[in-house]
Image: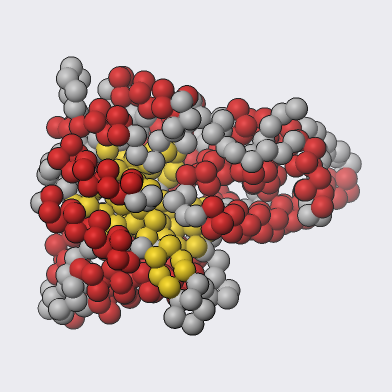
Amino acid sequence: MLVLGKEVILAALIVGACFCSSFSYAWMDAAGVVQKLPKVELHAHLHGSIRLSTLDELSIAAGAGPLKVTVSEEHSGQVEKPFELFPLIHKVVTTKEIALRILHEMIEDFEAENVVYLEIRTTPRPLPDGTTASEYVRELTKAIHAHNHQPQRKMLVKLILSVDRGRSFQEGLQVVNLLKEHAVLVDPVTQATEKIIVGVDFSGNPLGGKFPEFQPIFDQVRQLGFNITLHTAEAEELTDEAAYDETDAILDFAPDRAGHMLYLHERHLQKIFELKQAGKAIMVEICPSTSLFVLHLRSYADHPYIRKFHSMHHPISLNTDDTAIFNTTLTKEILHMMVALDWQPRDIALMEARALAHLFATPDEVQTVRDRFWSVLSSLQADEASALQQQEQEQEEHGNHHNRPKGWLDGIAREAVESSNDLAAADSLETIRGRLIASSLEVF
């Protein structure tokens, strides 16, 4: 009997909503398809995701004048261009109220894109209004907790604290202390607990301190039971074709996820795939627009590794990194890669489904996200079935007979299982069929 995971069921449903490339999704344009699909965002920095309209407003209020710096694909290769905004962002984020505004607007923006799970990462910092780093983290966790407990909320939000490699080891250790202090929030009314901070990131200027210098911090984080994601191979200077380098050290440490991975040698790729075969797959968080600028790419199609990861069914996610810095959205980032790589909704659907195995939330929370996935996909399936029925009626009126595809569910399920050997829960194909039918979803 073929063994399947819960994500496989979701993958089948997603593709049921979009079908395969031979089934035109003319009922919506490509942007509409991607916007409506349930998605996860796993690599998004708080301050870099400030709304440009908010940044413009705060810039004027701070006496810096209207916002002048924006980026587009035509600036590809101008590595410093996007990051010209950071000094302005740091200048205007002066109070906890502004930081909370950025957080609330970021949550609103991603929720509007049908993102069902969002991880926000930030480096703990004091603010000019006297807010300490500890108070900064506490305010963010309280706001996220309040969002997660709204009756009608559609997206689960979690926080990741970042260790800045451009700062000292002792400052990095403070992140561990903040993790212990603020990770779990106790509801003052119900006394129920929620783990708001779910992991720690290693980021900052890639030419700052090296990972081996900070590894004892991440050893502590791991011992405390938190997940780890590390910005990896962001700069050519960090890799060495002939000698052991920082990327080797990171892969030996084997974090749960890794961001970017832009400069890899063959031995690095071999190690990544060996870890996957050993059941320790490191999900790669790809940020397309970041890659375009940092790698001096001519187009999104020139990303050096995404085709290989995709063909090897290695877990990847597409992310925004910094929506303001790169003037982007998650829908845009996915569309860039769909167009560049000639991907179909099927490819995006399976990628998003596989990503559910790599969320940093608790198992119960992941199940909540799955349930939300199911709800959105059921709605999409109903819309698609209605559109196809109308299309068939029109064709029959004109004497044309349209044959619906047979066996698409079997094929999708098998494909997802073969490419996701690290999935846990088991279900047979017939169980999947039963669940779909029980949900009043049409199985062809």
Identify the residue at horizontal 83%, vertical 36% (top origin): 403
| Picture quadrant where residue 135 is located | bottom left
> Looking at the image, which is closer to me, 304 or 432?
432
Coloring basis for residues: secondary structure
Query: Is 73 left, or right, of 245 in this rendering?
Result: right
| Picture quadrant where residue 353 is located | top right
Query: Is 250 left, or right, of 112 in this rendering?
Result: left
Q: Could you say where residue 73 lies in the image, as x and y percent from the top left?
A: 30, 46
Q: Is residue 156 visible?
A: yes
Residue 102, above or below 400: below
Q: Could you say where residue 182 lies in the image, as x and y percent from the top left?
A: 32, 66
Identify the residue at horizontal 68%, vertical 38% (top origin): 426
> Looking at the image, which is closer to me, 117 or 377?
117
Identify the residue at horizontal 30%, vertical 72% (top origin): 138
Residue 219, above or below 269: below
Q: Could you say where residue 36 lies in the image, as x and y percent from the top left?
A: 58, 56
Residue 383, above or below 282: below
